[in-house]
Image (tube, rainbow, N blue to C red):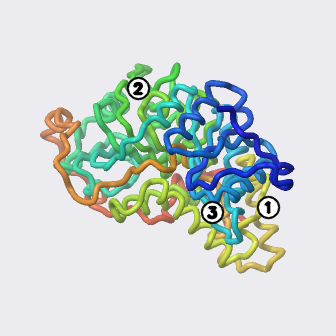
Amino acid sequence: MAAFAVSLACSAHGTTTPAQATYAVAISRSAAADPAWLDVAEALRDKHGVDAPVIEFDEASDAGRAALVEALRQRKASMVGIVLHPTRASREVTAPLQRALRTIDADPESDVAWGIITARSAAGARRVVEHVEPLTMSIAAGTADFPMQRFDHSAWWSEEAAHRFTLHHDGRAIDPRLDAATIGNAAHAVLDVPRIDLLMTGGHATEKGLELGFRRPAGAVEPRDGALVVRCHDGRVLPLVHASPKAWIGAGNCLLGHVNGPDALAAVAIESFGVRAHVGYVVVTWFGRGGWGTLDRFTKEPGVRTLNEAWRENSDAIVGELARRWPGSETLVLASWQRDDVNGFSREVAAWIKERSIPEADARELAGLLWDRDAVVYLGDPAWDVRVQREAGVTVDPWSSIAAHGAGATSASPSAPGASSAPSPSAAASTPASPSPAGGPSSTGAP
């Protein structure tokens, strides 16, 4: 079935009468021009039993986004999957979409659950659509400070020390002798196993890769030729070949969710690494509420929320706080943010604050919340039922051989995630930037 092109004109003149549905499927005009991507949208429509046609909209214009909003309003949709081509899934598209999808009704928060369906190719996006099995998460890994004890098995490596790994089941470092030359092998051993349910990461990243060390760089996880690899410090490249269905939360990574083309890390992770839901920043990180807040809501009450629900609740909380404390800021659009220009953002926010005589004590938090308001995106089907397990189970340990190798390791630091609860939702995502005149990010904050 061909996509149904929605325009402001046809909505205004009542020439269309889309059926009411809780789930709607939309596709950008650029993606709809490619039959393979149009098939992705039709497959998503079939998956959810949507009777109404796919909504085609112009992702590049305010009028196109307004048309999408009107179509969703008419259909009384409560959830929408939006198919985007990876060349048209950057923040220039996703941030205006976030703002538009808050305007379906009068309140400032989002009015529909939504997610972006994209990948390196239409075939990769089709795999996201075709995945239907719920996932109860019991195996987790990553660099973020996450509550390891909530999973049957978990692995964590330090962003600060760069060469310290910890396994939850015995609370000991895998190998205290790790250094820049061997950490790549350890990271590969953790990541390339038959099953990981959840990755949670922080530290240095761009669309081109996730660095293995923060203070002491030691290689990276990066896309190469359509697949993810571990690039070791000495130049060796170790492919990641296992692709179990999983979610990835880039809680504190700059640009990890920014799909600026088919070879962006997020697009390739979806394509070849089994990622079926990805939450990540489309700009550099600073304040951290968007990423760390999502991680906190997802893990602090195991099983209560799906990942999409945690992300949406956190985003709505940011917008709600902006509207309540500094009316007008919840809809403020700054061109400098769209350019990822932290210095320009600081100047524009400082001017806005000065005009309204907002107390200087509020400046940093206002700027931080405003920076994160449209900064974190959800890639994946919003209907996917993926949750942290409610209680411990009996999942097979994917890292038993690593544990045996590190049997003589020293005890983990008391501050390691296995000995702590989830981080505060306002925790800094990366190196905390020095406060600017507006209290916003500065160019010293490294992604």
Q: Would residue 257 appear left or right of 147 to someone viewing this image?
A: right
Q: What residue do we see at 67% from left, 71% from top?
A: 107
In the image, which is nearer the foreground, mark 2 or mark 1? 1
Pinpoint residue 392: horizontal percent, then vertical percent: 20, 55
- The span from disc 3 to disc 2 (Cα, nearest Å) is 44 Å
Q: Which residue is mark 3?
A: 111
Q: Amino acid at mark 1?
A: Glu
Residue 179 in sight from this viewpoint: no
Q: Amino acid at mark 3?
A: Asp
Mark 3 and mark 1 in contact? Answer it, CB < 8 Å. Answer: no
Pinpoint residue 313: horizontal percent, then vertical percent: 52, 64
Comparing 24 with 95, the one in front is 24
Comparing 118 with 443, the one in front is 118
* Secondary element at image label 3: loop
Total count of labels:
3
Residue 296 in sight from this viewpoint: yes
On screen, residue 103 above or below 230: below
- The span from disc 3 to disc 1 (Cα, nearest Å) is 28 Å
- The disc at residue 348 is 1
